[in-house]
Amino acid sequence: MITYHLALTGMSCASCVSRIEKALLAIPDVQNAQVNLVNQSAAVSTIKNIPVDVLIKAIKHAGYGASVINNLEEEESTKALIEKSYYRHLTYKTIFAAIVGFPLLVMGMLDFMPSLITPVGRQINIGLCFLTFLTLVYSGGHFFIGAWKALRNHAANMDTLIALGTGVAWLYSLFAILFTKWLPPLAQHVYFEAAIIIIALVNLGALLELRARRHTSGAIKRLMSLQPKTARIIRINEEIDIPIEDLLIADLVRVRPGEQIPVDGIVVEGQSHVDESMLTGEALPKEKKMNDKVVGGTLNKSGSFIFKTTRVGKETTLAQIIQLVQHAQNSKPALARLADQVAGVFVPVVMIIAILTALIWFNVGAEPRVAYMLVTSMAVLVIACPCALGLAVPISVMVGVGKAAEQGILIRQADALQQAGQVTTIVLDKTGTITLGKPQVTGVYAVQKMDEQQILIMAASLEVGSEHPLAEAIINAAKDRGHSLLPVTNFQAISGYGVNGTIQEKLIWLGNAKLMDLQKIPIEGALKNQTEQLAALGQTPLYLAVDEQVIGMITIADPIKPDSKEAIIQLQKMGLKVIMLTGDHHGTAQSIAAAVNISDVLAEVLPQDKAKKIAELQAMKHIVGMVGDGINDAPALAQADVGFAIGTGTDIAIESAGIILMSGSLQGIVNAMLISRQTVGNMKQNLFGAFIYNIIGIPIAAGILYPFTGLLLNPMIAGAAMAFSSVTVVGNANRLRFFNPRNNIS
Ligand code: ADP
Ligand code: MG
């Protein structure tokens, strides 16, 4: 699957979203198309490589503009420029419409409008007719162009509604001037001020919306600002500052106190403390010494060091985070797709309602029927603009995803953001999730004539071929004691059980009790008892067997992360069921679970069965969040309703998880859930805010209250209400920016 990213122009409202999506989906090989109204972009996934021109052409054909996004930073700055000039022009247009419209409005309210029957009055009106025509062209031209483009595609959008509403008002006024006598006396009236004020108000709404929207992309701007412009590189006999784009892999870079680390790498000299909070959300600076990984964008505190670059350019963690956040901000949760569908049918429905309103007023309405017909259908057209509807959900997603990134929580898909807060059951992997994932050998026991040293040497030699954290622990223990390892042939890893291989022509097995069972190697009573005792202390026992005989045992312990228990208790307080899932020994698992307040334990589960366990929980109507390291838990993460990958701070390419926690802390799950709940709540408020104006407004605009109270909605008030609805939505979404999960923990 290949994904193309396009910048779009000419979109005005929610109905444009579904139009462009439809146009893209109509192209063969296009699998998925997501258009985002908030930052005017499209993400298109195709089965195979296709020329981008095909996509651009299809969008142009639908009446919009498109260009490819190559460089995110460049894109961001050109977009800022375009937006700035757009904003300036829109300001002029709005001011001009207000200057023309306001005096007319005052005159109308004071009943000062020149008469249509006196010759002088007629002349003034003809003058106004020209003036308002110019204003419509200058200040409101974009509505008419948009409406025309839509019409050519046999479609209608928000522009259509505004253009129709104001255009009809102006045409009616022209008609009233030219053929005054044909109209009943009470309908001899012009509506120039209504047309102009509506244009001014809708423009004003768009301006306010643009302003508020600028803040929503703050997260990306903040991330981009973390990247320094230059790096001090060490060449054979000199040190120079070079632009960061010129850095290559394996360059040596010096970082001085207080400097930002330019790209990713490994420390080769010196030591320091590094503040990684901007990426992980973790407040405490981390110690960095020889061979430790450093991440671009983080801040060096007091020391000075040299590191060798490992990832530069688009490959750096920071660049990937930016890309991830940007994509997630553009993705749509189920709620948004629903809103888009509604918006897609909204405009035609509104037009039908407007026509019905006009027909009813014309046929059975009160006098002056013609004037009322005009006022009511105009008000219906204007108030029913589905503008805020298209913004409601995406704008919350933008803010919510950005907010999460600030806390070191990377959200891959908006769907994960929508779902995280609904999770009822959290399944935690043990190794690397609850525990540090840095196990250490705690004991080596010899059973027969062998000595402990030989046991450790054999075990370590075998484990060289394995990537399991336990293997690392055993190898490190042997190295620390200065042992040299033996050559191994026929190495084999048995996932969830252990390893085997041949050393000095003897077949050797190393693994858990299940492995011994599987090989029918007996474990004698005394050793078994000892094993259970050690397991009850949280240690993982591994057996070493040669010639079908257990000759030794190695115990390994993986310390629990200091804040695991606290986070688990918080999850439980939030009403979640917390379960531990592990491949480790029952006793060991129980002991660790007890230490972190977990009572439900699924132990000795083979890696391939972990996903099955999740599915079983789902079948019992649990909404499951699975938390794992993303390496051997990938199928389980993918199976869960929401997969949380516990990151190491550098690995963010974990595709199987919907949410990546940059810091290793389980507190991230609590925060992610709180942010999710807050964001979904915000989306719903926005949808309500967007709909309420329409739902209450349309019947009133159509004149439903007139028979009872004589109340009609002035089309200008309709214009104000519709402008206000987008401002409400954007403003409400911005409220999310101030949400802090820390203040919401009981
Ligand atoms: P976890 O759920 O803790 O991540 P795994 O499924 O990765 O556990 O492994 C489960 C068990 O299998 C380990 O606790 C260990 O007993 C055994 N095992 C797996 N790989 C190895 C290995 N390379 N060496 C020794 N034992 C292993
Ligand atoms: Mg694991």
Image (cartoon, grey):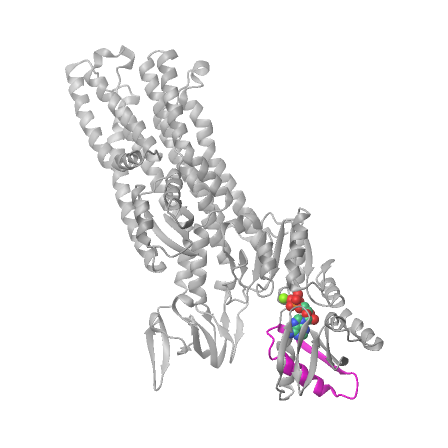
Q: Is residue 453 magenta?
A: yes
Q: Residue 570: in sight, yes or no?
A: no
Quarter of the rendering containing residue 150: top left
In-image side of 646 versus 396 (left or right)? right
Q: Nearer the viewer, residue 567 or 350?
A: 350
Residue 274 image position (x, y, % from top left): 49, 72
Quadrant placement of the N terminus? bottom left
198 vs 519: above or below = above
Give me the residue at 15% from left, 15% from top. 119
Quadrant of the image where one finds ligand 2: bottom right
222 vs 290: above or below = above
In-image side of 680 versus 233 (left or right)? right
10 vs 118: above or below = below
In-image side of 380 versus 473 (left or right)? left
Residue 115 image position (x, y, % from top left): 21, 16
Which residues lie in the magenta part?
Answer: 440-469
Give me the residue at 25% from left, 28% from top. 103
Give me the residue at 51% from left, 60% from top. 655
Q: Is residue 531 magenta?
A: no
Q: Residue 679: in sight, yes or no?
A: yes
